[in-house]
Amino acid sequence: MRILEFKRTYLLQKIYRGVVGPATIIAVAYIDPGNFASNIEAGSKFGLELLWVVWISGVLAILYQYLSGKLGILLGVSPFDIVLQKISLGRRSIFNKWMFFTTIFIILLTTDLAELIGILLGLAVILKIPVEYITPFAIADVLILLFFVDKLEYFELSIGILISIVGFSIIYELILAKINLIEVVRESFSINFEKLYGEPIVIATAIIGATIMPHALLLHSYIARDNWHNKKDLKSSLREHKRDTIINLSIASIMNAAIQIMSYYMFYRSGVSNVSIENIHKILQPLYGEFSLIVFGIALLFSGIASSIVSVQTGVYVFESFIGKRLSKAFTRFVFRSINMIPLILIIFLRLDVINVLVYTQTILSIMLPAVIIPLIYAVLNKELMGSHVNIFIKMISVISSIFIIGVNLMLLTYS
């Protein structure tokens, strides 16, 4: 019996370590409130015309996340650190460092603002209360952060549990929606750049910004460093990192696409193109019942909580890298979250459409994405830094994908 118990425990641990890892934390970027907003807008307004954007964004995100983790494992730094090292020389070094830090700080603020809004939306849907009355409760997630254990494995497990709740909620909604898999597969490969002109380009860039999130690219370097950098067998660490990234982010990509699919079948097929927090209960409740509304709210709420924890953790790493010394995580988290409450209160006070605000936060992240991916590609494809670990094939794909992202952003700016 003891032998069987040992084997069962060993098997469970092996499965756990094979699935749950640093990329589990990164997977949150695929199903955060920004993904919900951009994919709900895409599905309800344009059907499945932008589903291919989700799949391409997911594949590119896996590529960039792999490169980010590789940078952390081999060099123990992130793209943020690479830029700081390069601009630390010269008379304008202090000014340049502060300018770049400000750019990254805006990215972090924009990201965390989206996560906070997601928490509010989830509570508003579940409790059927206007968003403005729930705003004071948004600060409560700081208390959750303060009690989080610093050990990486517990952090990974906690995020994994939150993601699982979101995932099961999305699956439940898909079952209710009665999707047509043949239609979904067909639309997944219906790539049409001409249809991007006009309002769809705003949603497309939002999907890119919501999936290939700049803060997640920074975070992956740091947590991969903490997990694998000091290990002697680098080849084994890189293999483990690749497997961890592909498994977790492939699952997350499917969940991300599922949000748009759900929106198409639940909203677009019902003739609803203008989804807001005020009318969502009027749509879901009559068609799919009260419980579907609660499950949808739970998905948004836990998505916001999980991604909020991750975005603040990124802020902690960035602040420590910039200042050059370790800080109290609890203090850093509290300061970071307190600053983010200011724009949130302004949004509520001005009575802006929170779903539209979420979409535009993701377009901002897409526009600012090159500030992270360019130094990332420069570092991992530089033979002086990476030596024999530079891959020519990956180099070509990385450059082409970066041109694609910059091109889509330019289309957005042209439309604007």
Image (tube, helix red, strand yellow):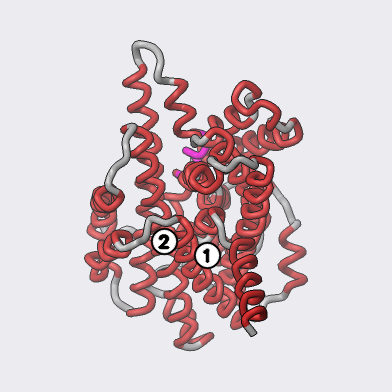
Disc 1 on helix, strand or loop? helix
- Tell me the amino acid under the disc marked 1: Ile
Count of numbered labels shown in the rendering: 2
Give SS at disc 2: helix
Residue 40: give its label.
Answer: 1
The residue depicted at 38 percent of the width and 35 percent of the height is 321
Local crowd at mark 2 within 10 Å, few (<14), some, or many (≥20)?
A: many
Residue holding disc 2: 355
98 versus 108 height, above or below = above
Write down the region rendered in magenta: 365-370
Residue 102: name its quadrant: top left
Q: Quick check: 383 left or right of 301?
A: right
Q: Residue at point 26% right, 60% down?
A: 348
Mark sitting on residue 156: none
Residue at x 30%, y 50% (from the top left corner): 329
Query: Residue at the location (59% across, 83% down)?
Result: 176
Horizontally, residue 186 falls left or right of residue 244, namely right
Q: Position of residue 269 (x, y in %)?
A: 61, 74
Q: Give the farthest residue toward the front.
A: 2
* Marks 1 and 2 close (CB-CB < 8 Å): yes
